């Protein structure tokens, strides 16, 4: 699966790691499965890590469809989580800015970062948080 989710309830955080190429259908299906996961809580902050992603096959129509999916998730909730998108390549940074614009009506506090360290600082997490997560995944 090109998108892997790490749910960290103790930090009220969901990390989505995008690797390789993700199609429109994979993108929507992945996030639908996240929202159906019993461990997922709408108030959880999100870190979208695009550092390992290849040029996406995600269309602007799919981003709009994703925005509608998000609106459905947040229609009847007071949650206003932070969403940090980490994009080290300009193409992804621009795509993330489009995502930020398209989801403007959704109650999310979205910021786009060039480095994971900046995103972690925005959440108030230590710089080595991702290193610790990677070590846990290898055990």
Image (spheres, rainbow, N blue to C red):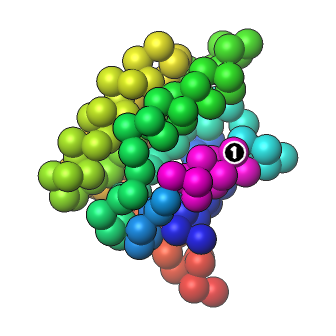
- For label 1, count other residues whose C-alpha is less than 10 Å away and answer few (under 14), some (14-19) or many (20+): some
Left or right side of 88 for 12: right
Residue 25 position by quadrant: bottom right
Q: Is residue 23 visible?
A: yes
Q: In which quarter of the image is the C terminus?
A: bottom right
Q: Is 109 or 64 nearer to us in this picture?
A: 64
* 40 vs 21: above or below: above
The residue that appears at 62% across and 37% down in the rendered structure is 44
The residue at the point 58 percent across, 25 percent down is 68
Camera-side residue: 6 or 21?
Answer: 21
Q: Position of residue 114 (x, y in %)?
A: 21, 51
Q: In this view, does 56 lie above or below 43?
A: below
In the image, what residue occupies the spot 36% across and 66% down? 53
In the displayed structure image, the side of residue 118 where residue 36 appears, left or right: right
Secondary structure at numbered mark 1? helix
User: x%, y% of residue 43?
Assistant: 64, 30
Task: Please indicate whether residue 103 sits to the left or right of residue 93 in the image.
Answer: right
How many marks are shown on the rendered structure?
1
**Towards the viewer: 75 or 81:** 75
Magenta region: 24-33
Q: In this view, does 1 lie to the left or right of 18?
A: right
Asked if the stretch drawn in magenta spans residue 114, the answer is no
Residue 82, position as x, y percentages in the image: 47, 31
Would you identify the image quadrant in which residue 79 lies?
A: top right
Residue ID for mark 1 = 32
């Amino acid at each position: 699966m090109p998108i892997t989710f790490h749910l960290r309830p103790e930090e009220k955080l969901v990390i989505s790691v995008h690797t390789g190429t993700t199609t429109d259908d994979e993108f929507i299906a992945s996030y639908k499965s996240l929202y159906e996961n019993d461990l997922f809580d709408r108030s959880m902050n999100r870190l979208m890590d695009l550092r390992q992603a290849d040029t996406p096959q995600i269309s602007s129509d799919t981003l709009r469809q994703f925005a509608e999916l998000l609106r459905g998730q947040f229609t009847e909730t007071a949650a206003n989580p932070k969403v940090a998108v980490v994009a080290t390549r300009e193409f992804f940074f621009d795509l993330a800015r489009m995502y930020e614009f398209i989801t403007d009506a959704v109650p999310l506090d979205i910021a786009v970062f060039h480095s994971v360290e900046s995103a972690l600082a925005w959440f108030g997490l230590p710089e080595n948080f991702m290193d610790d997560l990677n070590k846990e995944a290898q055990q």
